[in-house]
Amino acid sequence: MVITDELVTYLEALGRIKLPEESRAKAQSDLQEILQYIDTLSELDTEGIEPMSHALPLTNVMREDEVQPSAPTEEVLANAPVKKDGYFLVPRSFE
Amino acid sequence: MELKDMTALELGAAIRKGEISAVEAAEFSLGQIERYDKQFSCFVTVQEDVLQRAEEVQKGIAAGAFTSPLAGVPMGIKDNMCQKGIQTSCGSRMLAGFKPTYSATAVEEIMKAGAVPLGKLNMDEFAMGSTSETSFFGVTRNPWNAECVPGGSSGGSAAAVAAGECFYSLGSDTGGSIRQPASFCGVTGIKPTYGAVSRFGLVAYASSLDQIGPLARNAADCAAVLGEIMKQDRRDNTSVATKGIDLQKVLHTDVKGMRIGIPADFFGEGLDKEVAACIEAAAKQLESMGATVEKFDMPIVKYAIPAYYIIASAEASSNLSRYDGIKYGYRAEHPADLLDLYTKSRSEGFGMEVKRRIMLGCFVLSSGYYDAYYRKALQAKALIKAAFDRAFERYDLILGPVAPTTALKIGENLSDPLKMYLGDIYTVMINLAGLPAASVPCGFDGKGMPVGMHLIGHYFDEEKILGAAHAYQQVTDWHKRKPTQLDRI
């Protein structure tokens, strides 16, 4: 697997991040090196092995569907960098 | 006994007996922070209400409201656990100034036990790292040698205990983040079984691997702390009911007759000779105490790091998508539009290692690569768990090194991420399998840096791990040694 400049751009877009121009080349070679190492996993025979997301057999942990008070608006907004009239303020998202 | 030499349980007992007050203990710890933290930078935040809280706890002890053996003991909390009204930064610019409106369950539980929190402890940004160098708030240094890293990501939690700035701390461990710094700083730390401690209020890195646990001066203290925080919590559906920790049982564990296995594959290429010698000596010690020790093969070891970095990065890229510059956290100025607000805020708010893992996670989850990487890693995870399940049919505990080396010099690994990842070889597989494991001081290298042994148990065998560690600490004094430079600062 070769990490191209286009792939780096694609991953930036997926992750909603932009690398500083001066560290792009290093990031690309680091990712290449990490991926090359990670590729050793392809040697491992996993034929017929069920993928495991959790080590403990917990499935469908249910609780009663009870009404609980929500956090007060002031608390929800307490850490918002920009707010207005009890709402989060965001840039215009469509014209 | 002098305060500086006391363990958390010894101090707790002295407070209960009225030999010292919780306020005096808190004043002592604040003095220690004043004296040492300029040098080691363990704390991101020192709380302003420490003495007030200590007074409150002292009254509570007198009134019978606090009965824990740890009541009144000053401690520290890793800066990725929410504590109401106290900055919880995760070592990131993204969360600088973020003051949670609620506390993590583990924090609530330790407060119920009468803890006196001194403040929040430094860490690698978003717990991604093994050196505590990537924090936005500066580099934490190793009390054994300030030129060296304390390990990570719970580097502040380990260094603060080693420097005597607090009597115990809470850390978190996703791929070794409690055990590796415990090993590097010569303290005892345990990552409990996945699900034993609630993750509610722990800032998420890789949710299927993250687990909160204690770091302290010895195994008995770790058992006492763990006993307080190991509670099932309906706010974390992956938390499970356990029988808790019976401290007396831990204190009276005999390793005689215990079967201890050592994976031969842990002693391969990359393991420092001096570290290997310390582990072999610890094995001999345990044998002389009546345990049987034997080596066995565990070839799956070499696939643990690839599987871990795929799974952890995938979950991180998903978990960290919540940082959008809107609800809380860092927000960039003058965005052109909504997408630009996300991208700018995240680019300016996250450091390089976090960006790297987000990109790696996006890659392994992206269409076309999902099966080859993410699915394959989950299969490897199943094989790793199966290998441990088979081993625990034959052994009570598994022994090995925590890290292939002792603490490295500051800056040594920062520019080479793969080299840093390789240092996690022995620890990450434990998180993948969801097992409990501790780091216990077992020697020093030629440069005087501590070495920790890894004691791994089967699911919910925390008592057995800490019991064996306690028995070992009754006949060894590695855990009692202190950096001599502390007297000169």
Image: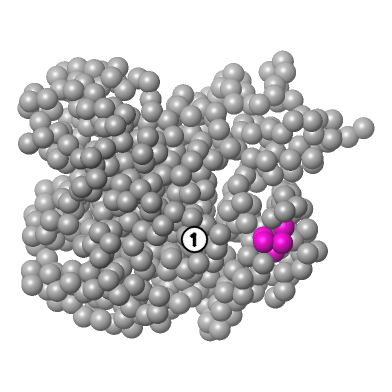
Residue A91 seen in this snapshot: yes
Circle 1 marks a residue in which chain?
B
Relative to residue B208, is residue B254 drawn left or right? left
In the rendered image, which residue does mark 1 sit on?
B413
Q: Work out which residue is located at the far right of the displayed protein and give it.
A: A95
Start-end of magenta stretch: A24-28
Residue B64 seen in this snapshot: no
**Which residue does the image show at 62% across and 23% down from the upper left?**
A77
**Which residue does the image show at 25% across and 59% down from the upper left?**
B448
- Looking at the image, is B193 positioned above or below residue A47? above
Three-letter code, disc 1: Asn
Q: Verify whether residue B195 appears in magenta.
A: no
In what quadrant of the picture does the C terminus of chain B appear?
top left
Front residue of B109 and B72: B72
Q: Give the overall secondary structure of the magenta segment.
A: helix
Q: Measured from the top left, where is residue B357 in percent x and y?
A: 60, 57
**Which residue does the image show at 48% across and 49% down from the upper left?**
B133
- State the SS at label 1: loop
Front residue of B215 and B227: B215
Front residue of B178 and B434: B178
Q: What is the crowding at mark 1: few (fewer than 14 residues within 10 Å), some, or many (at least 20)?
A: some
